[in-house]
Amino acid sequence: MTTSITGSGAIVVSTLHARANFGKLIDRVEAESRSLVIEKRGTPRAVLLSLRDYVKLAAPEPEILRILGERSARNGTNKLTSRQIDRIVRATRAQKKR
């Protein structure tokens, strides 16, 4: 067995296949947003995750940030640059001082 997919969608490969195809497997994990289980002699020994998935596991996003992110995406403000945000903040502060 070189590659299979579990019921949870994880890719399962042997250590030999992982070693020979490491670069391709990294690309696949990232592109398909899947984890990669590496088996040695049929026993799961390690997991490869995309950096995004690892960060989600290591430091889960607080609920309020998730809600703000969704609202920002709906309003299109998630595409603003830092300079645009700075201008908006300065303008808002100037109006409040009046």
Image: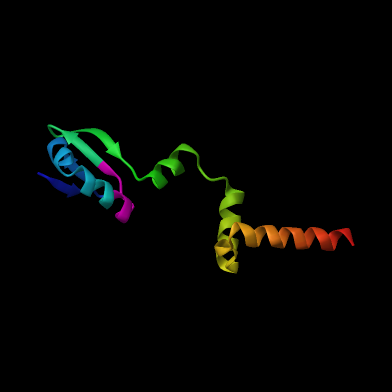
Residue at the image point whose x is 39% and y is 44% from the top: 51
Q: Is residue 84 left or right of residue 19?
A: right
**Do we see residue 8 in this rendering?**
no
Q: Magenta stretch: residue 94 in it?
A: no
Q: Nearer the viewer, residue 33 or 96?
A: 96
Residue at the limit of the structure toward the left, as seen here: 1
Residue at the image point whose x is 60% and y is 64% from the top: 77
Residue 30 appears at what percent x and percent y? 32, 51
Residue 73 appears at what percent x and percent y? 55, 64
Residue 38 appears at what percent x and percent y? 21, 37
Quadrant of residue 85 in the image?
Answer: bottom right
Q: Which region is colored magenta?
A: 29-36
Residue at the image point whose x is 33% and y is 43% from the top: 49
**Colour mapping:** rainbow
Residue at the image point whose x is 57% and y is 67% from the top: 74
Q: Quadrant of the N terminus?
A: top left
